[in-house]
Amino acid sequence: MDIPFWNKEIETAERSRLEQIQLERLKVTVGWALKTALYRKRLNQAGINSPDDIKSLGDLRRIPFTTKDDLRVSFPKGHLAVDMVDVLRIHSSSGTTGIPTVIYYSREDVDNWTDLLARSIVGAGGTRADVFQNMMTYGFFTGGLGLHYGAERVGMTVIPISGGNTKRQIQTMRDFRSTVLHVTPSYLLHIHSKLGDEGVCLEDLALRKAFIGAEPHSENTRRKLQDLLRIEAFNSYGLSELNGPGVAFECVCRKDMHVWEDGYIAEIIDPKTGEVLKDGQEGELVLTNIVRRATPILRYRTRDLAFLHPQGCDCGRTHRRLSRILGRTDDMLIINGVNVFPSQIEEKIMKIPEVATNYLIHVDKKGALDRLTVKVEIYPKLFLGEVSKLESLKHKIVEELRASITISPAVELHEPGSLPVSEGKAKRVVDERPKD
Ligand code: ADP
Ligand code: ZN
């Protein structure tokens, strides 16, 4: 296989060289962090008063973790390390769960971020000959603009269509013969289900790849997308606190995502004790941004559960690979005392061929007991067959789920298009239990 690189020297650098770069950049970052109200005190308390107090990468562990709440408390400027006149761009989270978090980028920060995205795109086989339809929302959300700049740097033909308006997305894919999409996996599944309504078949399209990210999805969802659309789908991971997309991205091997370790230091910790775990062990991903000046963020607890692969990759890159996100520390459902992650449910149902492209997890209470209902859309032709077939399909889904999550949910079968869809990040769980 021909392996494409954006910056081969840095992408295949020896580990010792990478670690040397990380140490140099960590020191510089700590210097910037010391300029912020958020970090000055906590670094001083940890005995770090100047960048020279960081002598080895091991010293990172002396720095306390940063949480989303810390960033909320420091809203709006407690974590800003430069003068506003040097800020080129602001991104912010939606703020639906309280005070939004805000991230500032200097000109250099935007430039460095763009470079990591160009690297990610090229690593996944994108080229200047591609027509790139960017279906992620433009605006405060980092997904749209982030990839936009990266794709332009690669020299792709960029269609900045943003999210939503499925009809127009499909027409655009056809009219401009888009070859690469950037999209959430749930929305791409929805788009596929609407191709027929627009009178479009795969032969009318020129799709070859999709970069899918911004929300959890299983390997079975990736396979489903690849089969339905006859494309290669690449997992893309990032979060606004750490720039946005471009933290980790799959290369052409499509075996989990390289974390760009010259831009980020990744650690996996035990979410309960904070202890740093070894490669291969699953825990919470903690990230330190080592090339961002305006908003330096140290040891950020992402709440995303994953592991780092201990071994390298067939592509020759030395930057370690991050597993797909296996769940979030805060999306775990407790159903009558049993811990259930939505990702376990998705993985099972997406491998059942009769299941179409959308599902919803519903939780409520009946009397004293929690009740879990999994609503799945199935292909319409199945409703034309015998009722007993539907019953046995339902039974099959219950059994698959029980084997994985140890409890039996109720399963409802729905026609395609009947469950709510999202044009950006999907909302898969509706929890209607009373909060006490
Ligand atoms: P918000 O926190 O407001 O949703 P972000 O866009 O920063 O805004 O969301 C980042 C989060 O999205 C990550 O912490 C992670 O939980 C999820 N996410 C992003 N990319 C992926 C991916 N490829 N796989 C699974 N989850 C992802
Ligand atoms: Zn690789």
Image (tube, rainbow, N blue to C red):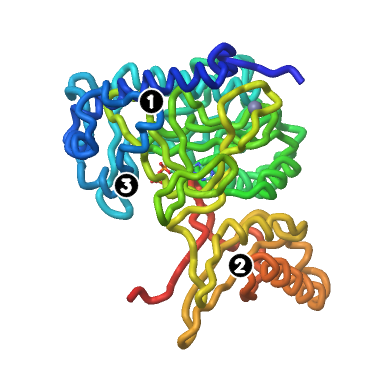
Going by the image, does 376 lie left or right of 165? right
One can see residue 171 in this view: no
Callout 2 amino acid: Lys
Helix, strand, or loop for circle 1?
loop
Pointer 1 and pointer 2: residues touching (CB < 8 Å)?
no
Instruction: For mark 2, give the secondary structure.
Output: strand
Say which label, 3 or 2, has the lower sequence index.
3
Q: Pick whichever of labels 3 and 1 is earlier in the sequence.
A: 1
Task: Specify few, some or many for label 3: CA neighbours under 10 Å numbering under 14, 14-19, or 20 or more.
Answer: some
Residue 43 to residue 126: above or below = below
Percent from the top left, x then y, of residue 45?
Answer: 19, 39
Name which residue type carries label 1: Ser
> On the picture, is 240 further left or further right than 169?
left
If the image is split into quadrants, where does the C terminus sit? bottom left
Q: Ligand 2: give its quadrant.
A: top right
Residue at 50% in and 24% down? 117
Using the image, determine if residue 7 lies above or below residue 240: above
Residue at position x 32%, y 22% in the image: 27
Q: Which residue is mark 3?
A: 68
Quickly name the residue at label 2. 375
Q: Measuring from the top left, give residue 77's x and y in whole percent.
A: 19, 35
Q: Is mark 3 within 8 Å of ligand 1?
A: yes
Q: CA distance from mark 3 to mark 2?
A: 32 Å
Q: In the drawing, does residue 186 fall left or right of residue 39?
A: right
Give me the disc on residue 56.
Answer: 1
**Disc nearest the viewer among 1 and 2:** 1
> Is disc 2's CB within 8 Å of ligand 1?
no
